[in-house]
Image (cartoon, coloured by chain):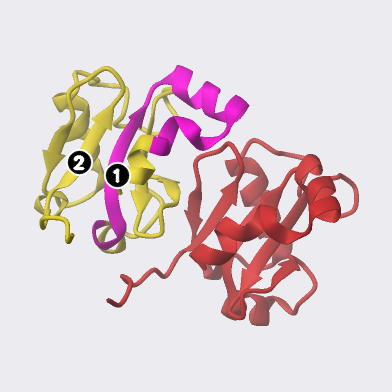
Chain colours: A red, B yellow
Amino acid sequence: MKPPVRTYTKVQKQGSVGRSIDVTGFRDYHELRSAIACMFGLQGKLEHPGSSDWKLVYVDYENDVLLVGDDPWEEFINCVRCIRILSPSEVQQMSENGMHVLNDCIQAA
Amino acid sequence: MKPPVRTYTKVQKQGSVGRSIDVTGFRDYHELRSAIACMFGLQGKLEHPGSSDWKLVYVDYENDVLLVGDDPWEEFINCVRCIRILSPSEVQQMSENGMHVLNDCIQAA
């Protein structure tokens, strides 16, 4: 059975209710990061990658997990399938145990 | 065994008898929120997300838990599998212990 059409992108964080956003409604990565930080009460933690231990990652149409912010913005909005906020402990856990912390997101994509 | 067909959507709240609603019978999120608030005696607590600590969430066809109200209405009615009302203490508990407070709902979906 074909899954229902979904034009919005799911944003998930462990321990929080997921949100859905229209990535095409943002102009650039900065706007996107600020909006997501605000939605999840993480102001100051996601806006400047590298300045905190939180990571904003996405799963693309090939089910690969990538850091949000590297690709040209227009390409990103066409490739993204879901976004995930990783806490410092998840980042740590991932480096120890591999990518299985992201399995839910990958399977859902 | 194939489960029986269910066209209505279950709405659940801890400590209350569940209800079933036909989401396609509502015109928009506002109508849906008002009706659910009324059914569960929560008038004023669900109509304006962000103005109270109660959260109206849903489980979609991929078993993800998402906030009701983000997605375009037409997509929401095609994606929703069950709705759950989270009390302020359940929201708090979820942020401390993860999503297991929603397991019943997720398994049911």
Q: Main secondary structure of the magenta part?
A: helix
Q: Chain of mark 2?
A: B
User: Is A56 drawn above or below residue B83 in the view shown?
Assistant: below
Q: Chain of mark 1?
A: B
Residue at the spot 53% in from the left edge and 29% down from the top edge: B94
Q: Amino acid at mark 2?
A: Lys
Label 1 sits on residue: B108
Q: Is residue A2 left or right of residue B101?
A: left
Q: Amino acid at mark 1?
A: Ala
Can residue B68 be seen from the camera position used here? no
- Mark 1 surroundings within 10 Å by alpha-carbon count, few (fewer than 14), some (14 through 19), many (20 or more): few
- Name which quarter of the figure residue B2 lies in: bottom left
- Per the image, label 2 sits on a secondary structure element best described as strand
Residue at the spot 87% in from the left edge and 44% down from the top edge: A52
Q: Which numbered disc, 2 or 1, marks the residue that appears first in the sequence?
A: 2
Distance, label 2 to label 1, CA atoms, is 10 Å
In depth, the one of A9 and B3 nearer the eye is B3
User: Is B20 drawn above or below residue B59 in the view shown?
Assistant: above
Residue B17 percent coordinates (x, y): 17, 23
Q: Which numbered disc, 2 or 1, marks the residue closer to the eye?
A: 1
Residue A60 percent coordinates (x, y): 62, 75
Q: Which residues are magenta?
A: B77-103
Q: Are marks 2 and 1 in contact (CB under 8 Å)?
A: yes
Residue at the spot 80% in from the left edge and 53% down from the top edge: A97
- Mark 2 surroundings within 10 Å by alpha-carbon count, few (fewer than 14), some (14 through 19), many (20 or more): many
In depth, the one of B42 and B58 nearer the eye is B58
- Name which quarter of the figure residue B49 lies in: top left
Label 2 sits on residue: B10
Residue A82 percent coordinates (x, y): 57, 64
Residue A56 percent coordinates (x, y): 73, 56
